[in-house]
């Protein structure tokens, strides 16, 4: 499905009927051949907004998956690039795929829950791509508190999100329908599988970030087509 080397419909169904952690363990070897992985042009253009190669000391990618963002963060960082993910399968795939990653910063792969991070002032940059749909709305402040604590003063949190779509667009209702289906699935089947669309959009993201002690810059139009409508957000720890 999606790509000759990607998962089949039955494999995706099996993933959706298990937990998030187990689902991504199953999907890991084929994840990069799905549309769920943030495209390289989006990663590169947004990370380029952070500065030139070697301009930061340390960086962390939250919910790092197969390490796509870590590959692009490594030339940016001089000392260390860490990735945290709850799926050991995804971390194993990241370690394999980053064996030849450009740059000299040390690579660290951490199995852990993004909501339970205990880093304290360790990073100049934190990124997170494509993972907000796996965070329940009530848990978003907790995630941001962990990211704020992980950053040094003046450190930056980078991510890409969207502006609220018009209800007149078909995609709005497709996303709403998908979210409704996931809620029904979680009401009928355990463990829950958290994956929702239209989450952490610019207005809510800005409000939550400012409440947690960040100053927020939203950059529109810096991503290449067809991703130009997406917003790149750089939140700086005050």
Image: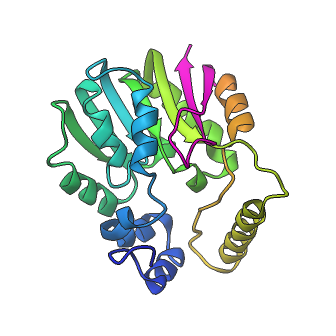
Spot occupied by residue 110 in the image (x, y as percentages of width and height)? 31, 46
Query: Is residue 118 among the parts visible in the rendering?
Result: no
**Residue 235 shows up from this direction:** yes
Q: Check the image and name the residue furthest to the bottom.
A: 10
Let me know if residue 207 is in the magenta part: no
What is the quadrant of residue 73 in the picture? top left
- When the figure is inspected, residue 81 is found, relative to residue 29, above or below; the finding is above
Residue 105 in the figure: left or right of residue 49: left
Q: Nearer the viewer, residue 98 or 23?
A: 98
> In which quadrant of the rendered image does the N terminus lie?
bottom left
- Expressed as whole percent of the image width and height from the top left, the position of residue 215 reads 62, 18
Q: Nearer the viewer, residue 92 or 159?
A: 159
Viewer-closest of 202 and 39: 39
Would residue 236 be counted in the magenta stretch?
yes
Image vertical order of residue 225 relative to residue 45, above or below: below
User: How was the colour assigned to the protein in this rendering?
Assistant: rainbow
Q: Quadrant of residue 142?
A: top right
Quadrant where the C terminus is found in the figure: top right
Residue at (15%, 49%) from the top-left corner? Answer: 99
Task: Give the farthest residue toward the right.
Answer: 168
> Looking at the picture, how far across and down is residue 116, in whole percent?
48, 43
Give the quadrant of residue 233. top right
Which segment is the magenta one? 212-238
């Amino acid at each position: 499905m999606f790509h000759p080397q990607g998962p089949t419909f039955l494999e995706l169904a099996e993933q959706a009927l298990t937990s998030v952690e187990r689902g991504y363990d199953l999907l890991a070897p084929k994840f990069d051949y799905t549309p769920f992985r943030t495209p390289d042009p989006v990663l590169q253009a947004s990370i380029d907004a952070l500065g030139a190669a070697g301009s930061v000391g340390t960086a962390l990618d939250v919910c790092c998956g197969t390490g796509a963002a870590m590959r692009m963060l490594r030339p940016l960082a001089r000392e260390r690039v860490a990735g945290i993910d709850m799926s050991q399968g995804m971390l194993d795939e990241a370690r394999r795929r980053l064996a030849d990653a450009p740059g000299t910063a040390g690579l660290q792969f951490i199995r852990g829950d993004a909501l339970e991070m205990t880093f304290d002032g360790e990073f100049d940059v934190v990124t997170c791509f494509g993972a907000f749909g796996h965070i329940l709305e009530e848990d978003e402040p907790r995630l941001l508190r962990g990211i704020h604590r992980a950053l040094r003063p003046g450190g930056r949190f980078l991510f890409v999100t969207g502006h609220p779509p018009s209800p007149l667009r078909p995609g709005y209702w497709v996303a709403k329908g998908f979210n409704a289906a996931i809620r029904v699935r979680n009401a009928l089947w355990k463990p829950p599988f958290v994956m929702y669309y239209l989450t952490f959009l610019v207005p809510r993201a800005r409000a939550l970030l400012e409440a947690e002690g960040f100053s927020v810059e939203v950059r529109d139009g810096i991503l290449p087509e067809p991703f130009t409508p997406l917003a790149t957000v750089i939140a700086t720890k005050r």
